Image (spheres, rainbow, N blue to C red):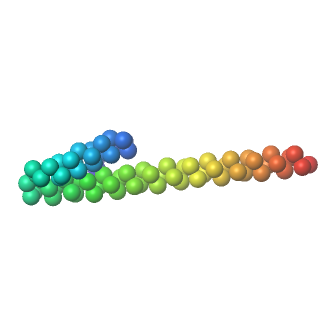
Amino acid sequence: MNEQRSYESAVSRLEQIIRRLDSGDAELRETLELIREGRELVEYCANELDAVSRGLEELRLEELVARLEHSGRDRA
């Protein structure tokens, strides 16, 4: 994917591709192109989800550290 794309727009495009393929109206070459585009979009979405997951994990770790530090101060 060369253009900037959001996760939401990628999912929307994937839905369009699926509808087109499910319709049975796509010719062989178009089907191949749609499948290639769909594969790229799935990879993009998976990478986006992985990045968000890592970010959430970092936030949870930061929150845990803050709680532990706060708990340590309460005991002192």
Residue at x 91% of width, y 49% of height = 76
Q: Please provide percent x and percent y for residue 66.
A: 73, 47
Q: Is residue 3 visible?
A: no
| 41 relative to 75 in the view: left or right | left
| 66 relative to 1 in the view: left or right | right
| 28 relative to 17 in the view: left or right | left
Residue at x 21% of width, y 47% of height = 19
Q: Please provide percent x and percent y for residue 51.
A: 48, 52
Quadrant of residue 33 within the rendered picture: bottom left
Residue at x 67% of width, y 49% of height = 62
Tell which of 1 and 6 is nearer to you: 6
Q: In this view, does 47 lie above or below 10?
A: below
Residue farthest to the left, as pictured? 27
Residue farthest to the right, as pictured? 76
Q: Please provide percent x and percent y for residue 54.
A: 53, 54
Q: Please provide percent x and percent y for residue 41.
A: 30, 52
Quadrant of residue 31 within the rendered picture: bottom left
Residue at x 8% of width, y 54% of height = 27
